[in-house]
Structures are given as C-alpha cells and as structure tokens.
Image (tube, helix red, strand yellow):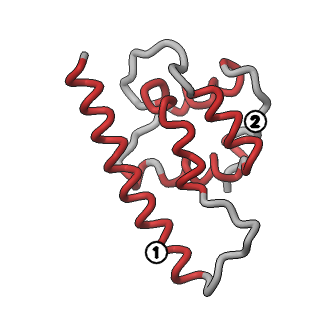
Amino acid sequence: MVASNFSLALTLAAIISVWVAADAAHHHHTASAPSPSSVDCSSLILNMADCLSFVSSGSEVSKPEGTCCSGLKTVLKTDAECLCEAYKSSASLGVTLNVTKAMTLPALCKVSAPPLTNCA
C-alpha cells in the first residue's frame, strides 16, 4: 500500500511538473502579459489531486477520497473551464482517465458541473 501511494504521488508530481511547464510555455507564446483576471488552471487543478486515485484508469477506489470533493467545488467555483483543460490534457501528461468514473464525480460530490461533453 505504501509503495502504491508513493508511486501515485511520484506520478502526480511528474504530471504536475509537465503540466506546469507546458502551461508556462503556452502562456509565454500566446500572450505578452497575462490579464489580471486569468486563472492558472494547472495550479487550480492541484486542488483535485486527491481525485486522481478515483478517476485513474484501473483504479479500484470506489469513492472520491480526501479533499477530492472540496477540490472539485473550488475548481467549479473559480473556473469550471479548467476541468475541460485537465480532461483534454490528461492523456498527453501520461494519465489515463476512467471517463465513466470521472463523469460521476459531480454527483458523488453533490455539486453541479457542466458535462465533459461540453469540452470542445
């Protein structure tokens, strides 16, 4: 169990590092100065780190753990579009999501969220 938690933490750290680097490169090339109201999705999505154990493909975790639901609420309240960015970039970051489980998160956390099908 400790080894799997360590492996999950290491994977999450690697994903976050790649995501932050990609996000920084994207902002560097697309805008000379970010607007004061822009949200850093990579930092915001970190609030949902505890959800990874539930939504990762192959996970046998049956319900969201830890601060997953409060993290989801924070993301939805701050910028729901960040969920789409996380969903769309997850595969390129080495995370294979169980989309069926990911789509159950709002109901399990008792929050309303736009459907993933709205992600263009």
**Residue ID for mark 1:** 25
Q: Residues within 10 Å of mark 2 (few under 14, many from 20)?
A: some
Above or below — where is 65 with respect to 16? Answer: above
Q: Residue furthest bottom?
A: 32
- Image x and y of residue 36, in percent: 73, 71
Element carrying mark 2: loop
Tell whether label 2 touches label 1 (CB within 8 Å).
no
Could you say which is closer to the camera, residue 55 or residue 43? 43
Above or below — where is 100 with respect to 76? Answer: above
Q: Is residue 65 left or right of residue 58?
A: right
Q: Is residue 110 left or right of residue 48?
A: right
Q: Residue at x 36, y 42 (%)?
A: 12
Q: Is residue 6 left or right of residue 105?
A: left
- Image x and y of residue 109, in percent: 68, 21
Could you say which is closer to the camera, residue 92 or residue 6? 6
**Residue ID for mark 2:** 113
Answer with mark 1 or mark 2, whichever residue precedes in sequence: 1
Q: Residues within 10 Å of mark 1 (few under 14, many from 20)?
A: few
**Amino acid at the residue labelled 2:** Ala
Q: Residue at x 45, y 61 (%)?
A: 20
Quadrant in which the C terminus is drawn: bottom right
**Amino acid at the residue labelled 1:** Ala
* Marks 1/2: CA–CA distance: 29 Å
- Image x and y of residue 116, in percent: 67, 41
Q: Residue 94 — which label?
A: none
Above or below — where is 7 with respect to 92? Answer: above
